[in-house]
Image: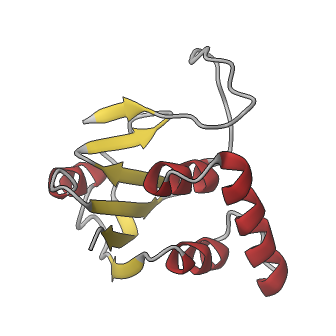
Amino acid sequence: MFKYFNPNPLFNGNKKGWKSVDCAVRSICAATGINWESVYTNLCRTGLETFSMPHELSTYHKTITKNGFKLVKKCKDKELKVKDLVKFSKSKGITYLCKVKNHYVCCKDGYILDTWDSSELYIEQYWIKTDE
């Protein structure tokens, strides 16, 4: 269900003690396969256009919709957990990006791809992309 994923160039392979606030970048990298530097640059460009920071929801939403993701749902309080979407992502060609409290995460190929396991967190909203 959880698979460690960290494309940040500063990550040196030592999982212990690794701290970063790049979850917006990391989740998009996991979902799209685009490298960390390019995703960060795209988020910054979008942020500059909208006068928002790269990790803000409006910037994130605009950036991922440019990459083919569609907003599926803004969830009601405690309606759906990350682990629930992981089950659906097992279907080939379906990728989810989720906004949970203070965090973004990717569910793809039956895994949560991130630096930590957020499976028990409730989803605030999520986007989907299918390979068609």
Specify whether 49 is left or right of 97. Answer: right
Quarter of the figure that contains the C terminus: bottom left
Residue 17 x, y percent position in the rendering = 64, 18
Does residue 119 appear in this view? no
Q: Looking at this view, name the residue that lies furthest to the bottom.
A: 50
> What residue is at 34 percent from the left and 43 percent from the top?
112
Does residue 60 appear in this view? yes
> What residue is at 51 percent from the left and 79 percent from the top?
65
Specify whether 75 is left or right of 102. Answer: left
Residue 16 x, y percent position in the rendering = 58, 14
Residue closest to the eye, 132 or 85: 132
Residue 33 x, y percent position in the rendering = 50, 51
> What residue is at 30 percent from the left and 53 percent from the top?
82
Residue 86 x, y percent position in the rendering = 23, 50
Specify whether 7 is left or right of 91. Answer: right
Residue closest to the eye, 131 or 22: 131
> What residue is at 67 percent from the left and 37 percent from the top?
8
User: Residue 75 is drawn in which quadrant?
Assistant: bottom left
- Number of callouts in the render? 0
Quarter of the figure that contains the N terminus: top left
Residue closest to the eye, 19 or 8: 8
Colour scheme of the rendered structure: secondary structure
Question: Eyeballing the image, is 77 above or below 17?
Answer: below
Specify whether 98 is left or right of 7. Answer: left
